[in-house]
Image (spheres, rainbow, N blue to C red):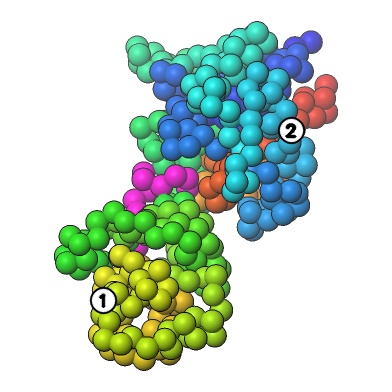
Amino acid sequence: MASFIAVIGGGPAGLLAAQRLAEAGHQVTVYDAQPTVGRKFLVAGHGGFNLTNAEPLPGFGLRYAARSPAFSRYLAHFSPADLRQWLQQLGIETFVGTSGRVFPTDAHKPAQVLRAWLNRLQSLGVQLQTRTRWLGFAPNNGLQLRDEATGQESIIHPTATVLALGGASWAKTGSDGQWTTALTQVGVQCVPFAPSNCGAEVAWSAFFREKVGRTPLKNIALTCQGHTVRGELLLTDYGLEGTPVYALTPQLRTALQLELPAPLYLNLKPDLSADQLLQKLRTPRNGKSLAVYLEKTLRLGPPVPTLLRELAPTEAGNSPETLAALLQQLPIPVTGLRPLDEAISTAGGVAWEEADEQLMLKRRPGVFVAGEMLDWEAPTGGYLLQGCLSTGAWVARGVQQWLAAEK
């Protein structure tokens, strides 16, 4: 006999859980407070629709840091290869970019991918009930809901529930973290949200902000607390943006708790060893300005001279040894991270110890949690979406196992 499963949240984790459960023959309804589902999925796709990553397992699992053991299980259940095959079944072809990131072909935009997915859900009989907000739990394993259009409240009694309510960044998409109130009211511990994959703030001088503006620095490496990430950096009026900054936000958060400002070290020539760089800088300057000398000797043009003037002592360019050290370990004093709502993702959420191995809440049997509302984080590059989808697939499996055990 088919069971009625309520999925609260129409993001990637919730929609995949709904699909898997419907394919298993269950009656599934997805409830979402927004007028349409998949809103953050669509917004994220505007900056380059990165679906997953071609990095092989088990290295892929290590991207989830402290949660690597758990995510290794989820990835084994729904891997990057499984994700690409699933997309192919929806009619979405993908390719691997030079960085290992996986994208849909040019013929498929985010809205088209979502439309194909929703068509599949419709064919399975999945019901979508939008403009419906989950308010919390009701007696007898009920869920209290509110119609956002009319304000009318109701209570439903599903056989099992999947909560996939997202984190707390990009509130305009519905990812606002309001659900923590309902969970803490029944004793579920939630770790406070913190920005992840976000920009870092630096107190640039007015001169620097005016002269540099938004300028990229290519082929650099950033280091914080012993972790180094290579890539491209963007200097902004408030500080730094870019994949290496995003990847180091966990380390920056920790460093900022220890001291202010937190040191972030920039290597402008990561392809050279210290000895190779020093040898090049021993080339006589012959009266050239530092800016001309760096351009001719190392192909380091603007804004590097201005950056050195901003962050290094005036006499830094006087000796090859001092200059070489600065070019490969230029300290950037980070004063903070960008606000939570600007972050691509969030750390924090449902504490890990509140859920069992199947991601069912220990305090609420039959209620499962998936996606970004759990306390985990991962870098950009396909790891975030893959993590959400893998937990969605894992939870669908857990629901079915729990239902079978309850019979």
Residue 337 sits inside the magenta stretch: yes
For the residue pair 165 and 344, the one nearer the viewer reads as 344
Q: Is residue 264 visible?
A: no
* Quarter of the figure with residue 59: bottom right
- Image quadrant holding the N terminus, namely top right
What residue lies at 38% left-to-right and 69% top-to-bottom? Answer: 300
Give the magenta range: 336-346
**The quadrant where residue 374 appears:** top right
x and y percentages locating residue 311 in the rendered image:
30, 76
160 relative position to 266: left or right: right
Residue with the mark numbered 1: 309
Mark 1, secondary structure of its residue: helix
Q: Judge from the rendering whether residue 287 lies leftward or rightward of residue 368; answer left or right.
A: left
Give coordinates of residue 282: x percent, y percent: 43, 88
Q: For marks 2 and 1, give the one nearer the viewer.
A: 1
- SS for callout 2: helix
Q: Earlier in the sequence, mark 2 or mark 1?
A: 2
Tell me residue 72's x, y (percent): 74, 48
- The one nearer the camera, 170 or 318, is 318
* Residue type (three-letter) at the residue carrying disc 2: Asp
The residue most toward the front is 286
